[in-house]
Image (cartoon, helix red, strand yellow):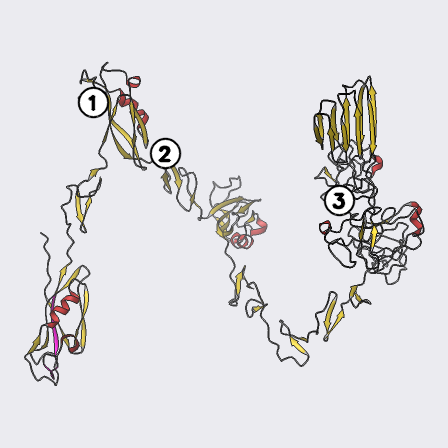
Amino acid sequence: MLMFLLSASQRKVICEDSKTTLSCPWNQVIKITQATYGRSDKRTCKHPNMKSTRCVTKKPLGISRKNCNGRTSCTVAANNRLYGDPCPGTYKYVTVTYSCKVKKTPKCLRRCHKQAKCIRGKCVCKSGYKGDGIRSCTNIKASKRKVICEDSKTTLSCPSNQVIKITQATYGRSNKRTCKHPNMKTTRCVTKKPLGISRKNCNGRKSCTVAANNRLYGDPCPGTYKYVTVTYSCKVKKTPKCLRICHRQAKCIRGKCVCKSGYKGDGIRSCTNIKAGKRKVICEDSKTTLSCPSNQVIKITQATYGRSNKRTCKHPNMKTTRCVTKKPLGISRKNCNGRKSCIVAANNRLYGDPCPGTYKYVTVTYSCKVKKTPKCLKRCHKQAKCIRGKCVCKSGYKGDGIRSCTNIKAKTPCKPKCQKGFVCNFLGKCRPKGCKRKCRINERCVRGKCRCKKGSYRTKLVACRKVKECLKNARGKDYNGRMSTTESGRTCQAWNKQTPHRHSKSNVRDAKNYYREHRTERIVPNAERINYIELKSGKNNPSCTFGVTYGFYGVKIWTKENCREKIKVCLTPKNRVPILPPPEECRKSTKGTEYKGRISLTKTGRTCQYWERQYPHKHRFSISFKKEHNYCRNPDNSGQPWCYTNDPTTRWEYCQIPMCECRKSTKGTEYKGRISLTKTGRTCQYWERQYPHKHRFSISFKKEHNYCRNPDNSGQPWCYTNDPTKRWEYCQIPMCAACSVREEIVECKATVRVSGSCFYKSKVGSSCVYTVQLTNSQAIIKTSTQEMVLTNGGNLAECAIFTFNDGTLKIEDDVCKCFEATVVNK
């Protein structure tokens, strides 16, 4: 039985209308033995009202036991509300007697296993045993036994942190109870061969398989049904030991010596303190570099110059070993502290000569410290942060970061208040009251009215437009604008200066570095593209058709010879003409071998290298393409036109040359291309819109955008224009390539090349006839038994070999007896 030691009883007196606390040590609890309320003498809790000394009630005993028993501390009060009034008119008190006793440990309700203990009312197995603590406590370290009958197998396994250890293994029969079978001639045949085999396969592993058969262990007793008995245990896997003794600042972890935190090395011979100082020695008249990792800086702790021993920097001149000066300390600290790397030299010019005639050296001790972020000298504003030693206002605030950080979005009140006709803006400044209407593009509100901005003028339609600078004629002799940038982006030299280029045009007045025309070559200024062209003298010339024979392209004027002198370029707001490319700037075929245009830029915008040059890239086309300047070409039958670039890092690139659009018929009712400009260069109106011209095709041609079409079977494709003064115009869409057929017949073997828009039909005897419908993109071939469509490459049919490539169909007919063909142009 458990014995509880009770401490001596304690007595507490609580006068009426007061209270006190009963308490015991932390490992003991209260036990109330006696409690009364009333008065039994005149000495306790003296008071004028003491009529009676023979009135006592025991009501406090039950209440205090309920509140205090089994607790470390509790409060006891004395009043009539709790216990009633045993003697009215008399001043009473509560007397409590209690003791502190050791807290009882809860007992287990059931008897524990012999290998278990009762802990806090529960049966817990002892160390090295596992179970419920009542019925079972199994020895974890104890061996396990497995029996495997002949011609079967089983798996041995251990927990994740343990491995198998085989202690015993036999094969044979020692009794008739195990693995019962009709063939049990003898029970005295056992071999220990399984022990070595199972140890080899299982020891040190978490799991393994053990089999029982004669092939593995032989047959110790023929004609008897046998079994394997294996006894094994699970051992905690041992951590591999280090083969060598580790450094005193290293630990053996998984068989390897690893330096402790804050140390660096191989763990056996060295573990250097990273935080400790490094030492460098620089012999006289030489120098060395001190350096630290990227996130650390140098801190010089010690530096001396002189000689203190004969081992360091050995030399014939070592008269004394007792001369040292500390001058290098201040100099090296000044040059090195706070830097990632610095150079330290050893010579008399820097530190003087403390011992003449002696060969000296500098000894420097330093350490690498993590670079501290500089702190702000002053306290930052509450809406600011300290960044690299400076107070910076947070996002959305503006100020010096110390005294002020003003909210940019918040309105600042105007001080003093604005006068009549003015309002306060978000910066806290007074501005004129807003206009009655919202100002349009190129307008601003000035004193309550919308006026044109600087550089704009008001038109007859009451709209403000920017003043555009342009040439009034192709030569631009009368140009007096303010453009001062060349077409390549270089700034112009002032006309009144002779550097960096000398010239004879210094008499130009008020020109500064603006464009003027004094040269024989004519190039339109790059600062403003000319988008308006008006024709006068060229209208009556039948050989000049706008958009075909002349116009504006890039930053240069281009024309045909017979129109050169009759072109005038000027600004006319009524007739807007967009920039058009010349007609040859497109390719008719996919590969574009026929392309002879003047595009000289690659897809990525790189300028082409001249074909006749061998720099920056050498090539084999310098002679054959000498006259092609630096235009994009396809000399080697590549995928499309290309050129060598002027970029030394990129040898060549393809050029961005669009495919030519054309119409197959004269009227072009089948045309589905994307040309949206008329012959005179006006932009087409969208078919779905009714402005500026109303029409009846808005629904049927809703999805045709503003492309040229022929919805009413007119002479050729046309469109309504965006010019209010011109309702409609024809579009300039060229005809597709005409049908071309070239035949070669040798000994009744025919080779035919067909290109363009053709319908080709052959007659070969009476059994093999085929037709071809050819366009620029495909060839539809029909024979008496099959139909095929070629877009690229070749195919073998029953009549001939067909090859379609780059818009041309090649037919090799070698099965004919005679050849006749009918060609119909379309």
Mark 1 neighbour class, 10 Å CA radius: few under 14, some 14 to 19, many 20 or more? few
The reply to whether discs 1 and 3 touch (Cβ–Cβ < 8 Å) is no
Look at the image and say whether residue 63 sits in the magenta stretch: no
Residue picked out by circle 2: 244
Indicate the position of residue 327 as horizontal and vertical percent values: 52, 53
Distance between the alpha carbons at the discs numbered 1 and 3: 93 Å
**Secondary structure beneath label 2:** loop
Extreme residue in the left direction: 54
Indicate the position of residue 25 as horizontal and vertical percent values: 18, 62
Indicate the position of residue 464 as horizontal and vertical percent values: 78, 66
Distance between the alpha carbons at the discs numbered 1 and 2: 55 Å
Q: Nearer the viewer, residue 698 or 533?
A: 698
Mark 3 neighbour class, 10 Å CA radius: few under 14, some 14 to 19, many 20 or more? some
Mark 2 neighbour class, 10 Å CA radius: few under 14, some 14 to 19, many 20 or more? few
Residue picked out by circle 3: 672
Distance between the alpha carbons at the discs numbered 2 and 3: 86 Å
| Residue type highlighted by circle 2 | Arg
**Secondary structure beneath label 1:** loop
For the record, the magenta segment spans 87-98
**Within the image, what quadrant is residue 406 found in?**
bottom right
In the rendered structure, the answer to whether residue 274 lies left or right of residue 521 reads left
Q: Is residue 636 visible?
A: no
Residue picked out by circle 1: 180
Q: Residue at x 6, y 80 (%)?
A: 53
Indicate the position of residue 221 as horizontal and vertical percent values: 22, 15
The reply to whether discs 2 and 3 touch (Cβ–Cβ < 8 Å) is no
Q: Is residue 799 visible?
A: yes
Q: Residue at x 76, y 44 (%)?
A: 673
| Residue type highlighted by circle 1 | Lys
Give whichever of discs 1 and 3 has the lower sequence position.
1
